[in-house]
Image (cartoon, rainbow, N blue to C red):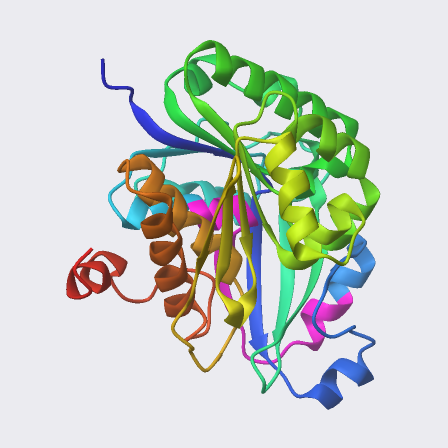
Amino acid sequence: MTKPYQVVGIGNAVSDVIATTSDAFLVENGVEKGIMQLIDQPRAKELFSAMGARTETPGGSVANTISGLGSLGVRTAFIGRVADDELGLSYATAMAVEGTDFPNPPVANAMLPTSRSMIFVSPDGERSMNTYLGISSDVGPADVSEEVVSNCEFLFLEGYLFDKDPGKAAFRKAAERARLTGARAGISLSDPFCVDRHRDDFRALVSGPLDFFLCNEEELKSLYQTEDLTAALACGAEDCELVVCTRSSEGVSICKGTKRWDVPVVPVKPVDATGAGDQFAAGFLYGLVQGLDLEICGKIGGIAAGEVIGHIGPRPATSILQMLKSQGI
């Protein structure tokens, strides 16, 4: 029996506010280059006011992945929290327009506003993210629809939600429900600092109810506290059925059991690195949904990531499907 959803994501529903800036702007406004920082509401207002021309899009790491999957024709849903305010209503509407079910209605009379992330893109394409989590970080078990999770083939979780205990409980509930209903569950580790904060919890999750995890090289080395990539991959493969590690221009390393695939990527001059990891995940998961070989999944992920770093914004601007067809995939 075909399930209604091929991939369901759970993550932060964050509106991305993107602006191109100089390195001098970053220094003047105390923005640390190249990392994601969590900020409070006053700091969010301050940075928003300091931005010049900006682009606003519905985002969040796993939400971007789900959007990318939707553009590839995958049946998707996204579980997240927004407030019943202008930004939250537009977020929910945008997800629906894109073809992704958003089963959680905007929260009325919320104590916190809809989340937003200020993303400053410097001339070298590096992204500096300042994120005010607002209401999105309050995702808990009650937000996880058992009906939605029970009716998916793949479940994909966002590591950033591990900063609060309700998020951890929501993930465990969703992952266990997915396993009971035959779905494959995985997580994106999100950020090396996130891994540092929750190493033991992540280890317990990937070695427990999860079937796969996606990460970059820094995150993987942090998870297993080693600078040796080969050793880290081996540890990951012992803990979890499938490990997928992106390595920027070095491509992606994929491990399943004792097998390892190193898949190269075509170099692309970066315009904006925002969303590269998210769209890699979309491409890779698309391959899994289609039942393709892991090496081909890695190649598709690289193509999707290469497309998104070639322009401003975290989501594809051209058809990834057409790109795949042109390359014989």
In the rendered view, would you say 183 is above or below 239? above
User: x and y percent of residue 27 in the render?
Assistant: 80, 83
User: x and y percent of residue 284 in the render?
Assistant: 40, 48
**Within the image, what quadrant is residue 69 found in?**
top left
299 relative position to 120: left or right: left
Q: Is residue 68 visible?
A: no
Q: Is residue 12 visible?
A: yes
Magenta segment boundaries in residue numbering: 46-65
19 relative position to 40: left or right: left
Is 220 included in the stretch rendered in magenta? no
**Within the image, what quadrant is residue 289 found in?**
top left
Is 61 included in the stretch rendered in magenta? yes
**Outermost residue, front direction?**
258
Q: How many labels does the image show?
A: 0
**Outermost residue, top direction?**
180
Residue nearer the viewer, 88 or 78: 78
Residue nearer the viewer, 23 or 282: 282
User: x and y percent of residue 209 in the render?
Assistant: 60, 20
User: x and y percent of residue 210 in the render?
Assistant: 57, 26
168 relative position to 288: left or right: right
Q: Quadrant of the N terminus?
A: top left
Instruction: Identify which residue is drawn at 65% across, 31% down.
Output: 239
Instruction: Identify which residue is drawn at 20% across, 55% down.
Output: 329
Instruction: Identify which residue is drawn at 42% across, 78% down.
Output: 268
Instruction: Identify which residue is drawn at 62% across, 67% down.
Output: 119
